[in-house]
Amino acid sequence: MPKNIRNIALFAHVDAGKTSITENFLFASGAIRNKGDVDDGNTQTDTLQVEKQRGISVKSGIVSFGWNNTKINLIDTPGHIDFSAETERSIMAIDGAIVVLSAVEALQAQAENMIRLLQKHHKPFIIFINKIDRTGADVDAVLHELQIDAKLSTLLLQNFDLDENSIPKTTALWTDKNYQNQTEIIEKIVALDEALFDKYLNDETLSFDELNQQLQKSIILQQITPVFLGAAKYAVGMNALLDALVNYLPMPTVLDEVLSGVVFKTKHIKGEGKWIALRLFAGNIKSRDVVYNASAQVDEKVKLIKNTDVGNAQILPEISAGEIAWIQGWQSAKPGDLIGKHLTSVQVQTEKPLLSIQLQATNKADTNRLVDALHILNNEDPDLNFRYFKDENELHINIRGEIQQEILQAELQERFDIGVGFSAPTVIYKETPTQTAEGYVRYWMPKPCWAIMRFKIEPGARGSGVQYSSIVSVNDIKKQYQNDVQKTIPTALQQGILGWQVDDIKITLIEGEDHEAHTKSNDFAIATPMGIMDGLQKAEMTLLEPILRYKIKIPEAFLGAIASELTQMRATIEGPEIVDGFAKIWGIIPLATSLNFPIKLSSISGGKAKYNTQFSHYDTCDISLGKTRAFKGISPLDTAKYILKARKALV
């Protein structure tokens, strides 16, 4: 494997300038002859028409280019929070990152969320403060927010000034020629290494190389976060940033295990079919190899391998550990799938959408094509969780917000020529039992069939999920049938008595029997939902609602008005902390009551407030404050129809 590779991603809040930086990188490296412009809609990584029209990235773009004898595989990620799953999945493929901030807007919500995620997964990163030429730019204020709000130990390695035309020029503070004058930088570096610290205290000579090696080590260990400056609009700071990512971000981690990799993106190209983006951690893959998908538990054959080089896309004979490439032929693969040896260490759990919407084709004749299109989009983003309820002729998907809904509408029109309308978004509730109950099923008619079971249903602790166990002997229910029961439990809990997924529940199979002659292979799988729903009906179900963690930074004068609004929305309030005339408060708040709060907050504060939220947990909610819904399809409580449907006797 070549040593000189860097697999990195660009992260930022929307409009911070990531895609413009990517264009500058490609141009500076010679990968493209002319720089594209976001406003002109001709950048390399924004390929959808809706991206070009809106000037925002909604899909991650993957490009490769060379710099200083190093191959850089770069992922340009979406900056809007509605597309955070695409952004979060790229974490699995990278070894380091650049977080881009605007010198005017400073530390915005999505950038702060990504910093937290990078820290969680131990991925080192560089901060790049962009737009230092803009009116209102304040580098010191950005550094202050990074240190206070994001708790980063930052190290500014550049300075800048503006010429008479307000075009910035950066100056390196850390080179082998001027390092001896940088006492503050040196002291921050040596403080992290005992041997260097002793030499410094004893006034011994410290070379630039040994200090710089310690700086690189400290960055990789996330003890120091280096900060660089620039203005992508004028290509200022681009070369220095490229040098920094080569010098300070790590080369690929190569594992010793047999073939290991992760799928972090899929795309469907008309006329070519499906391609998957793969990061390989160990081993190599050749064209026509059969590779095991550990997540899907299937073997799939590689048809073609293609590189990610800009303007030089080529079919490759193979890829090796440390590389990123496109692979054609894996029909079962989806983002997040682990290839070869199971690598739990690279998995990233994306925050799931908390809103659900229903779609209808504008032209009813397009419904079947819409179903097919949504299956494709669901493969590209499994968090859509597309469900087609044929009995009601309803199509449902999960989304994160209004912008994602608008983009999906435009994407369905652009890619599939299908016009769609949407219902109003609904908060995704869950349901949970409030008391212990027993569910019983005796599935022995109409013959031939035999599956008898009794389940104990108990409430689970908040956040405990679904716990299943069996105390039934294999002499009463054979092991293979008990396995069928366990496999069917998730399906049986997709809809409960209140119409939502059942969670925080403990289920125990306590009695049951099969029949040597009458039990068929699928009987216990058919019977399980009937037994579970019988128990849920007796367990007095209640709603669980999604709760967000929030953080607000506002001018102190607006604190009272904002606190009043939060109280009305059933929020908890902690703080305040008052710093430099700004108040910081935080707490938890129900999603259902706060959907329109960002608009109200902006109105009250005159646009001067900062509001950041993250999903926290699901908690109990009075049914009168939430929403129940009818069961979709045929309920297992309607046993006669359910059995006919399960046995494919009812169309």
Image (tube, rainbow, N blue to C red):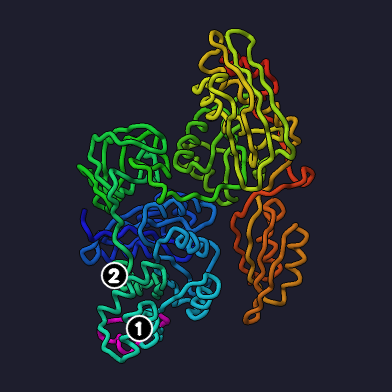
Q: What range is drawn magenta here?
A: 165-182
The residue shown at (66%, 78%) is 578
Q: Which of 131 and 543 is in front in this view?
A: 543
Check disc 2: other Cα within 10 Å, few if <14, some if 14-19, many if 20+: some
Residue plotted at (29% across, 46% down): 257
Residue at disc 2, secondary structure = helix
Using the image, determine if residue 323 lies above or below residue 173. Answer: above
Residue 496 image position (x, y, % from top left): 67, 33
Residue 307 in percent (x, y) is at: 26, 48
Using the image, tell me which numbered label, if any, was put on residue 197. Answer: 1
Work out whether mark 2 precedes mark 1 in sequence or the reverse, and give the earlier one.
Answer: 1
**Residue 510 visible from this viewpoint:** yes
Does 627 sit left or right of 252 as displayed?
A: right
Position in image of residue 395 (x %, y %): 59, 33
* Label of residue 509 in the image: none
**Callout 2, which amino acid?**
Asn
Residue 243 position, x and y percent, is 29, 70
Q: In this view, does 390 lie above or below 196?
A: above
- Pick the quarter of the image with the C terminus: top right
| Residue at the image position 20 percent from the left and 64 percent from the top | 69
Q: Residues within 10 Å of mark 1 (few under 14, many from 20)?
A: some
Query: Is residue 169 at all visible to an observer of this figure?
Result: no
Q: Which residue carries the number 2 mark? A: 247
Is 63 part of what is drawn in magenta?
no
Q: How many labels does the image show?
A: 2
Q: Is residue 67 left or right of residue 446?
A: left
Vertical comparison of 342 with 557: above or below: above
Q: Is residue 138 above or below residue 56?
A: below
Q: Nearer the viewer, residue 145 or 293?
A: 293
Element marked by disc 1: helix
Q: Which amino acid does label 1 sit on?
A: Phe
